[in-house]
Amino acid sequence: MASSYSQEWRSVCDTFRNAQTLSDIESRKDPENDPFRSKYKARDLLKEILTVLKSFDTGETEDDDNDAECQTEEPVDGGKGEACGRRCPGDSNAGIRAAKLGVIEYYLGVNHVETEELSAGEEHLMKCMKLLDRCTITQENVSLCIQARNQLGILWAGRDETEKAQGFLETAESIYIRYMKEDGQPPMDLTEFFVGEEDQLSQQERTKRFELAYTHTLYYLAQVYKNLEQFERAGKYCHSTLQRQLELNQFVPLEWAINAATLSQYYITKTRYMEGRHCLAAASVIAGLAGEVPSEAAAQESEIEYEKREQLRQKRAEIARCWIKYCLNLMQDAKKLLEDNIGELDVDRQAELSRVRRNEEEERERERKSTVLFSSSDTFDSICALEDKVSCIFPLDFEEARAVFLVGQNYVGQAKEYFEMDGHVTDHIEILQDHSALFKVLAFFEEDLERRCKMHKRRVDMLEPICKDLNAQYYLLVCRQLQFELAETYYEMMDLKLAVADRQDDLDAHTVKKFNTLCSASMKYYEKFLDTARSPDGKFPDKLEDEVLRPALVAKFRVARLQSKLISASPTVQIENLSRSLEAYRFVVQYCEENPEARPAVETELELSEEMVSLLPIKINRIRAKIAVN
Amino acid sequence: MVENMKGKIRVFCRIRPMNRTEIARGDSTIVSRLDEYSITVETARGQREFQFDRIFDTQCSQEEVFQDTNRLIQSAIDGFNVCIFAYGQTGSGKTYTMVGDKHLKNPGIIPRTFNKIFDIIHKNEAKFDIKVSAYMLELYNERLQDLFVSPAEAFSKRIEMKKDKKGLVFAQGAETKQAASPSELFALFEQGCANRHIAATKMNVESSRSHLIIGIMVENRNLTNGTVCYGKLSLVDLAGSERAAKTGAKDGQLKEANSINKSLSALGDVISALSSDQPHVPYRNNKLTQAMQDSLGGNAKTLMFVNISPSDCNVEETLTSLIYATRVKAITNNAQRNMDSKEIAQLKEIIVKLRSGQPVEEEDVQ
């Protein structure tokens, strides 16, 4: 072609480059009151290019026939390939011309969207699509096909038209899959249409940019599915997005790690512990890539180092907390499968589950192989190593449970290092509550009653000091949780002490004293809890708030039980205890009489309270009679 | 997302009237109040409905809006921990609700709160000795800044939230100033605002992107029996919820183009939303949560005002971190069934025995 064409072409390329610079770089410096200045300039340049490109067309002859043919086709979105018959090959002159125009229309579309002119943006993007629909999908235009649809997906999602967005994005997805299957060559990047030969991108760079575009497709689809409340699918796409980020090395370590850790929590809600474990292991490994934690000294010196230290320590501690939840939930879900109707380990179920587990070995192996794994060559081994440290199948006996417990306990230590009490009260206590829960569920697996009791004692030792320390009004909810938990734990211990004595057929004075102490401690905490419902002048409310209703009535019910459980040789004391018990049962009955809407919340307890209210006086009288006789 | 907050926080919605510009432009109202608890918004896709604990429409006065806040202030003085948040786009009426109009002809929540505190103090002068002090902070770009000192001084100070011996969360490193009257409190507030403005102009900070936190501490000594209780009232004016739009590129945080949707940093939001009962959600932008967490921790007295404009409703989800901090938490898990069952089984046995006239000792029944 004549040199004037090349010169003209060069100037088009220059204009394009300027437009990009204005849009991407200069725009960041635009002032508050004129934020789109550079973008508007870029827009003008792009429009110039469009005019010039179209003027080139009038010079061409050989492809006009093809164009005419192509123009008779109905523009089709869905781009599923050759469904409508004759299309120009994407790599023909006509195809390339269409692509060039398409690229400019694309950038104009994005420009309008970025300056909040959605309708105009849509128009340009649709024009881009129409141009490309006349052509087959080739190395030249596939990236543009996908990116245009990505943009349209975002645009429609922004207008709350989620299904429309879904359409565009799912098409982009199938275009990618098909292209990779049938062709697979590193596609041209959008910018390459307007650069000189010498500035063409390497295969590697092309692949990188193309893959990034597809990662975005998956990422937008994840959002779309979430908005459509198809959470299972959304989760899958989140997982894929994360995996691609890792594979293509396009991620920020801490951010990626937190995302993976968060995803693990989703898997836990679905009891998919294998996937959950994989996410957590990957999260831990990748978080490790984020660098060394600056020392305390360095942090004192520099604000930047301080921030860095804070960030790293905090994120790693958050990941540790996710691990704690993993271990805890794994054990708790196992317990649900193993327990009988009064919460003890059912040995028959245990045997059954062992049998099932053995049979399912193969199934699990298959599952493992089909899971989308986070893999980049260097991290894969580290991730596997971490996974090997903890099981992902339900523990069925004490040994297995203990192994999981120890992993969880280790992470408790790690988490507490950052989430110290001072400065992170709520977080610190949550971690302690998790630690207590770990002990509680481990106790379920422990056969020896004495050892079980010791585990509960650990819980008490952990939570009691905190409970005493906290400002009850400031940390109202937390205090209530702790009081209730301590009351229940003391109750457990009391029951266990008695069970041990029973088995040994040995209820001596020492044991009785111990029993009564535990009994009283339990009562004390239930009473403390009930006190938190009182008004500042000490009055118990006539009507309990919703969130306190059931716990409060249950607390009263338990106090009633506990009062009658106290052991004493003295009939006078017995009467006193039983009277207090009766009083508490009466409270429950009376409250439900005065507040009938409360009944459903405590049906069973109410029923039993009513019984006891009628039966206890008889028992008390019997004891009185005994005293009279003596 | 607003739905998620409701069990724990009460959310009040306030719709402001159309302003002159909007009327002149001929904008139509797309927000209307359905009943006391719901509003409808006309979107391109049709009508959407939102539920709140109360709706204040354009007719409602400042006084009406303040009524519900009244009781909360009493709670703070009684020794509880109270938080009041205001949320909404710049121009949605947030400042009007929280502060009031110019010259305070129609004072908002903050000045009324100041007055109310001292009203209560005066009423109880005979029985209680109540002291009031305050701190004022700005949270911007993950950094807490003291607004009671000059911007220059504030820049070099580091503030952290800590728990003191009384169990209250306070801002370590921040100036706490005493006040003996509403006007003193208001003067402090104005000084803080002035400092905020200076800092904003100087450092090119968009005040609409920062959160304002006012902490009012109340020390209440019972003159009769000498007991002392401490309460706190936090007033938080949340950063504007408007879209980052053109500012995205300035932020430096978004890696791709400027729309929030295009940045993979939203991936975390998607993952967090997959299930409403995830065991633990590590929050990402959490300086706000960190600063407020322990203030919110456990207490049940939180109120959120959501301000919306009638011609554009943007009830967005910028409050992700706060939402996790205030997720509905039960006092006790329902999974206490096993304990109930064992206990209830025991009691049933006892009842059977009692009914049949048998003597029964508790310790025999296991």
Image: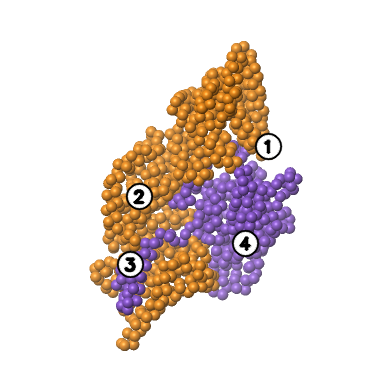
Chain colours: A orange, B purple
Q: Are tags 1 and 4 found on a single chain?
A: no
Q: Amino acid at mark 1?
A: Asp
Q: Residue A370, how many percent across, how many down?
A: 37, 38
| Helix, strand or loop status at disc 4 | helix
Foreground tag (3 vs 2): 3
Q: How far apart are the alpha carbons under marks 2 and 1?
A: 56 Å
Which of the two labelled residues, at mark 2 and mark 1, occupies the earlier sequence position? 1
Q: How far apart are the alpha carbons under marks 4 and 3?
A: 47 Å
Q: Residue B350, how many percent across, how many down?
A: 34, 73
Per the image, the residue denoted by label 4 is: B69
| Helix, strand or loop status at disc 1 | loop
Kindly give the residue lying farthest to the left in the view shown. A504
Per the image, the residue denoted by label 2 is: A407
Q: Dot 4 surroundings within 10 Å: few (below 14), some, or many (20 or more)?
A: some
Instruction: Report the residue at 31% width, 65% height from top.
Output: A496
Q: Dot 2 surroundings within 10 Å: few (below 14), some, or many (20 or more)?
A: some
Which of the two labelled residues, at mark 3 and mark 2, occupies the earlier sequence position? 2
Q: Residue under mark 1: which chain is it in?
A: A
Between residue A21 and residue B227, name the one nearer to us.
A21
- Would residue A526 be visible to someone looking at this image? no
Give the answer, above or below, for where A582 lies relative to A529: below
Q: How far apart are the alpha carbons under marks 1 and 3?
A: 74 Å
Q: Quadrant of the N terminus of chain A?
A: top right
Per the image, the residue denoted by label 1 is: A34
